[in-house]
Image: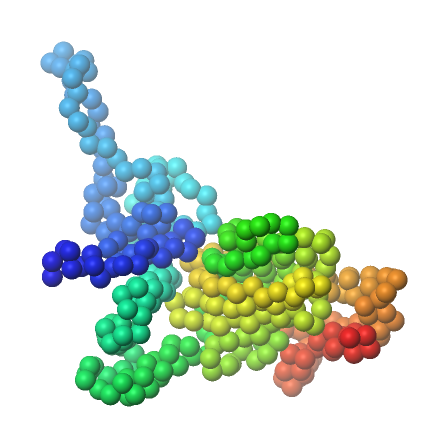
Amino acid sequence: MSSSATVSEHLAPAIKAGIYSYHPTSGLSINGIPRCQKAQLLQHLAFVDPGPALTKKGKPRVHQPVRPQDQSAEFYCAQMVHYGLATATDAPAPRDAAKQALRGSTLLVPAAVLDVEAGLKTRYDEENDRLRGGTGDKAEAGRQKRQRAAGEPGVAGSSDQPASKRAKQSESAVKLATGPVNLDAISGYYHIIAKVEMTFADEPLEDGFEFGLAVSPKRSHIWGKFDFGPFHGVLRSTRLLTSADGAVSFHWCGIDEEIGAAVYGSENSCTIQFLPGGNIKGAIDGWPCDEPRTVEFTGIRLFNAPMKEDAAALKAEYWGLYQENFENDAEDDYPRFGSFSRMCARDFSFNSDTEDSSASADEEDLDDYDGFSIRCAYDGFY
């Protein structure tokens, strides 16, 4: 295949997610620096500066030949992330320290990095197919070819099948791709892409977002922490984590920075669908209180970037924020919760998903419905 034909197939620009990017011509890149293959990287690591060319008398020559140069510190720091020796959130290391770490490594690409690359490749292929013709037969054939290469069952290789049968196979492939949530591949920070409208700004906010998730020790809840700029808060899952489509519902408590008030009502909801390759897509509702808006977002889990807070810390922050404002509302002139605040206060003693207790398995299941205080508070006033 000619180079011009190859280039014409790559219509989409590189897909980016934080420090990661992907394009078929370079593969996965870290801050724009592709992975250097092991053999070539070992040559770079063995580099020794020959020093200036000398005269017969041992003095540097006036006209120096071109000297070979070592790779930059940025290059070696990128290779550390490629080979699992550093994370996306680590501060850049000095060049000598980075080279020393690489010399002591087996230089094997970890599975988590390969997962990030696979996730970005999937997103690139989808965007490239859209630019090349969207839902045409060529795009469908490209998707089927990638599915066969990935070993996915249920995708036929014949291109002369009826369109209805191809559509059913495509739908089956989607169902396989969006299976139940893999709780072992959730915890950590995510790079988020979203547009957040701001009350006091003409342009929406499109960067600077923070998003992280943590699974509770009993694996009964997913807790999360987010910052979308004008509002931030803590997430708590409110349904079983075994849905067939990989979607999980959440309630959230947080702070609306634009009006300087807590946001914790029953309308604060979030839905996240967990997709292959560490990808997610979701929507969060309920901000701000007086004008509910929906923020849609997509994201990808950052390799080897664990949450600073565990599930217990997020749980304490969530219930602390909720209980604090629940009590403060009782002192307002127009209380949102009034005298129900103490009556409906949540009992923290049982049904904990982060602490040991004598609760039975059935009681733990009921923990999915311990938002009774939320419903009780609203029943009399809304």
Q: Position of residue 157 (x, y in %)?
A: 20, 81
Q: Is residue 209 left or right of residue 351?
A: left
Q: Is 306 situated above or below 272?
A: above
Q: Farthest residue in the top direction?
A: 57
Q: Is residue 155 left or right of residue 327?
A: left
Q: Is residue 136 visible to the viewer in this orientation of the structure?
A: yes
Q: Is 154 situated above or below 61?
A: below
At 23% from the left and 41% from the top, the residue drawn is 44
Position of the C terminus by quadrant: bottom right
At 11% from the left and 61% from the top, the residue drawn is 1
At 67% from the left and 82% from the top, the residue drawn is 366
Q: Nearer the viewer, residue 353 or 243?
A: 243
Q: Is residue 252 visible to the viewer in this orientation of the structure?
A: no
Q: Farthest residue in the front direction?
A: 202
Q: Position of residue 132 (x, y in %)?
A: 27, 65
Quarter of the image for residue 162 reads: bottom left
Q: Position of residue 78 (x, y in %)?
A: 35, 47
Q: Is 62 situated above or below 123?
A: above
Q: Position of residue 4 (x, y in %)?
A: 15, 56
Q: Is residue 221 left or right of residue 83?
A: right
**Total marks in image:** 0
At 31% from the left and 74% from the top, the residue drawn is 135
Quarter of the image for residue 342 reads: bottom right
